[in-house]
Image (spheres, rainbow, N blue to C red):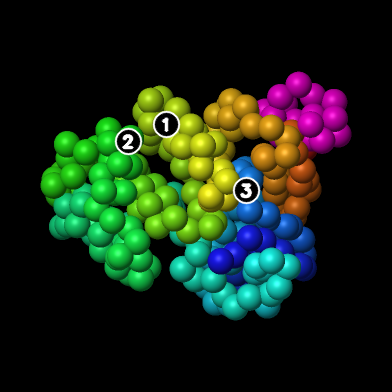
Amino acid sequence: MVDQIKIKNLSKSYGKTTALRDINIEFNKGKIYAVLGHNGAGKTTLMKEILGLYKKNDAIHYYHDGQVISFPKYQMSFSPEQYSLLEDLTALEYLMFVAKLYKKYHSVTQEKIYELLRIFELYEKRNKFLFTMSNGMKKKISHIAAIVLETDFVFLDEPFAALDPVSIYTLKKMMKENIHNQTYILCTHQLDIVDSLGMKNDRFEVILLKQGNLIFQGNIKQLLYNTNKDSIEEAYLYYH
């Protein structure tokens, strides 16, 4: 298990382009984190570094009960902005396949998958091939695949893109209800949706990145106080 991720002096470059510059951030279990920033700010790069999608980075440390642990590959899951599904499989086949990849075939039962498919109004399409589904449906399948694994940390890149209003509400509700079991780290441009989460200050934090630099991490109360603004959107514009 992993209950804390600490990042110390993380930098990442692509050739002459610096994507992240000397980043120091801490993520703790039992919260929702919204990572905000313009295109190219380093949001997705930050996620991928934590997930080890490039290679293990010595600037990132994972903890359980205050002790450093080895890279917790199977306790972190990811729904990318550009989903990549095996579209010749049905929705149910794909979700069971992901469970096997994560070595959770026995704990991720068909009933758990059915429950999430019902919640996201996809149960009737469980035996449909993914290539027949709309972009919004595929996005929901990608989210279900990340959530059903019951990992400690769930990373969602642009999670609300392509979703209809009902699905956005469903996803927000699910995250808030599951916060004691899973930590959610969101990268998004949709500030109005983040603003509408309605989370308590001790359960929700905002991280602002600008051109690879960390310019703020803290709760909503701190953000609004620091900027003398009334909303996340106004505070975001203040920094940018």
Foreground: disc 3 or disc 2: 3
Whether residue 122 sits left or right of residue 51 in the image: it is: left
Q: Which residue is mark 3?
A: 30
Q: Label 1, on which residue?
A: 170
Boundaries of the magenta span? 221-236
Where is residue 215 shown, x and y percent of the image?
78, 48
**Mark linked to residue 103:** none
For residue 135, say whether it is visible: no
Mark 1 or mark 2: whose residue is earlier in sequence: 2
Pointer 1 and pointer 3: residues touching (CB < 8 Å)? Answer: no
The majority secondary structure of the magenta stretch comes to helix
Whole-percent x, y for residue 7 in the image: 71, 65
Asked where in the image residue 58 lies, by quadrant, the reply is bottom right
Label 3 sits on a secondary structure element that is loop
Q: Residue at x 48, y 58 (%)?
A: 151
| The one of 234 and 173 positioned closer to us in this rendering | 173
